Image (cartoon, grey):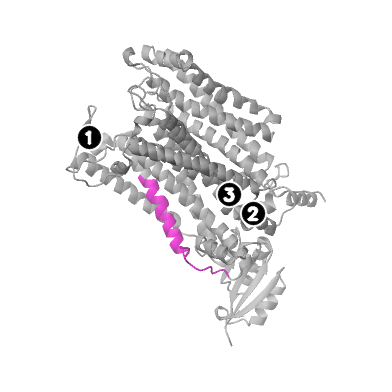
Amino acid sequence: MHSEAAIREPLILGHKTYHDITNDIVGPIENKAPRGWYILITISALIAAYGTGCILYLISKGIGVWGLNKSVDWAWDITNFVWWVGIGHAGTLISAVLLLFRQKWRMAINRSAEAMTIFAVIMAATFPGIHMGRIWMGYWVLPLPNQFGSLWVNFNSPLLWDVFAISTYFSVSLVFWYIGLIPDFATIRDKVTKPGMKKVYGLLSFGWTGNAKAWTRFEEVSLVLAGIATPLVFSVHSVVSMDFATSIIPGWHTTIFPPYFVSGAVFSGFAMVQTLLLVLRKVMHMEAYITKKHVEYMNIVIIVTGSIVGVAYITELFISWYSGVEYESYAFINRATGPYWWAYWSMMTCNVISPQLFWSKKLRTNLAFTFFMSIIVNIGMWFERFVIIVTSLHRDYLPSSWNMFHPTWVDVGVFLGTLGIFFTLYLLFARFFPVLALNEVKSILKVSGESYKKEAANHHHH
Amino acid sequence: MANKVIYAVYEDPELLKDGARKLVSNGIKVKDVFSPFPVHGIDPIIGITRTRLGIAAFMFGITGTCLALLGIWYFNIFDWPMNIGGKPSQALYKNLPAFIPVTFEFTVLCAAHGMSITYLIRNKTLPGMPARNPDPRTTDDKFIIEVRTHENHGHSAEAITDLLRTTQVFEINERQY
C-alpha cells in the first residue's frame, strides 16, 4: 500500500473507520436539521425573496431604475457579475487543479467548494441577463437562424466569448460535480431507512454499483475532466477580463488583465470557501475532516494569490506613469486621489496589505481570524471590480460628461438578493447533499488518518 | 448442479486484493469486485482492461473544434461578413486569433459532455436505473469479490469457499441464481 511520510500532518483526525465516515456525513442528512439551520435559511430565503422582487421590478421597468447614467453605463451590475464569477473559480480550481497536483487535502473541501462554484456562477450569470434589459430576448446571444436576413452574432467580440465561456464553465462544473456525487448518493441510498428518502437518493444515484470497471471509468473521467477543466478555469476569467482589456478605455486597456483577473478570482474564491467552510465545519461537526491544516493550506493560497494581485496593482500604476500617456496616467491618479479614493484605498488595504498578515503562522492557523479575513478579502475584491469599472468610466475624455455613480435601492436590492439566493442554495446543499466527497475521503483514510499514521509510525520503529 | 454465486466480503481493500490474487493464482475467475471507493491495483489482478474513455473524450473534443471553426467560418466569414470598428471579417485564417476563445470553449464543452454521457451510458448509471450492487454494505465499508460457479467448471462451490476461508475474509455468502 502507498504510505505517507510521518512528518506530513494527518488529514483526518482521531480514529475513524470507513463506517464512521459514512455515519458522520450521512447522519446529518437523515436526522432532523438543527434549529440554527432553520433560522439561517429563513433569513436568507427572505432576502432572496426581496431580491427576486427587485429583479422582477427591474425587468418590468427597465434598467433605468438602476443608478446608471450616460458616463457610468456599467456599475454595480457588472461589478457583481465579475465578483460572483471570481468567487465561482475556487471550486473548480480545488477539484481540478489540485487533483492534477495530487493534493489529498482537496478531498475534504472539494464537494462544498464546487457547490459554491455552481451557485456563484448562477448568480453571476443573472447580471448580464438582467443587464440586457429585455431578458426575453436573451436567446439573441446564440447564433440562431433568424428573420433578419440571417444576421449572426459577432464572434470577434469578447462579450460573445463570455457567453460561451460562462455557459461552458457552468455546465462542465455541474457535470463534474454531479459525477462525483453519484457514488456518494449511492452510499446514502444504501444507508437510509425511510422509504421516501431511499427512493429519492436511489433516483439521484442513477443505479450506481461500484464495481471495479465502474471505478476505473470513474477515475479516468475525473482525471480527464480535471485536465480539461483546468485550462477552462483560466480561460473563463481571462475572457471576463478581456471584456475590459480589449476596449480602449484608459484603466481597462491593459495587457496585464487576464493573469491579474485569474489570480484575483482564485483569491476571492478561496476567501468565500473559508467563509462557508468555517461555518459548515462548526455546525455540521466536521472538525475531524476539515482540520486546521486544511484552513492553513487555503490561507497559503490566499497569500500567494493576494500577493500576485498586489504586484498587478502596482505594475498597473507604474505602467500608467511609464507609458507617458496622459489619459492613462490620469485614470490612475484619479483612482487613488479622485472622488473615489475611498474605494481605491479600501481595495488596497483589504487585498494587498491584509493578506500579508497570513505570513504569521499563528494568524493563519487561527480560525476566528481566518473567518474575519475571509470577509475582508471578499469586501476588498468587490471594491476591486467597482474601482476598475466605475473609476475608469466616470471621467472620460470630455470633462462635460464627467459624472458620479449613485446606486439606487434597486441596485442594492438586486445585489443583496443574489447573496440571499446564493446562501439559500448553499444551505439546501448542506442539508440534503453529502457535504464531503465521502468516498474520496475513505480512500485516503488509511494513509492520511491520524490513528493509522501513528500505528504505521510505531510499527516502523519496532 | 445449480449455478451458484459466491460473495466473499472483506473489510479492507488490501485484504481483498490478497484474496483476489489467491483465487486467480488457483485458476479461479473473479467475476467482479464491488467497493465503496476505487481499489487501486485490482484491475490487472482480475483482468480488467484500461478504459478507452480518454480516447472518446479526445474524439469528442476534436469534433467540437471542427464544428466550432466550421460554424464561425459560415456565420462570420461566408454568410454575413461584418465590418465592426474597421476590423473586417475577411478570411478564417486572418481572423483566427479572435475566433480561438470560442473554438476552445466549444472544444471543452463537447469533450466534457461527450465523455460524461459516454461514461454514464457505459456504466449503466442513468436516471431511474435500479441499484445493482449485491450488498448495500459495498457503498459503506465492505469490499466484495464475486465468483460464479458456472464460470469456473473445474472448481466446486465448496472448493472455492474453502480456498476463500484461507484468506482474511470477513464473511462468505452464497446465492443460487
The residue carrying mark 2 is A28
Q: Residues within 10 Å of mark 3 (few under 14, many from 20)?
A: some
Considering depth in this image, is A353 or A11 the residue closer to the camera? A353
Q: Is residue B79 left or right of residue B121?
A: left
Region of the chain picked out in magenta, as a range:
B106-133
The residue carrying mark 3 is A430
Identify the subunit bearing mark 3: A
> Can you give x and y, in whole percent of width and height, for residue B70 in the image?
26, 46
Q: Amino acid at mark 2?
A: Pro
- In terms of secondary structure, where does tag 2 sit? helix
In the depicted structure, whether residue B121 falls above or below residue A298: below
Residue drawn at 56 percent across, 72 percent down? B31
Identify the subunit bearing mark 2: A
In the depicted structure, whether residue A408 falls above or below residue A326: below
**Residue B89's disc number:** 1
**Residue farthest to the bottom?**
B1
Kindly report the secondary structure that dominates the magenta region of the rendered protein: helix
Q: Quadrant of the N terminus of chain A?
A: bottom right
Q: Residues within 10 Å of mark 1 (few under 14, many from 20)?
A: many
Quarter holding residue A273: top right
Identify the subunit bearing mark 1: B
Q: Does the CB distance between marks 2 and 3 fall below 8 Å?
A: no
Are dots 3 and 1 on a single chain? no
Residue drawn at 45 percent across, 57 percent down? B53
In the depicted structure, whether residue A178 falls above or below residue A290: below
- In terms of secondary structure, where does tag 3 sit? helix
> Can you give x and y, in whole percent of width and height, for residue B77 in the image?
21, 39
Q: Is residue B61 visible?
A: yes
> Can you give x and y, in whole percent of width and height, for residue A361 in the image?
69, 30
Q: CA distance from mark 2 to mark 3?
A: 9 Å
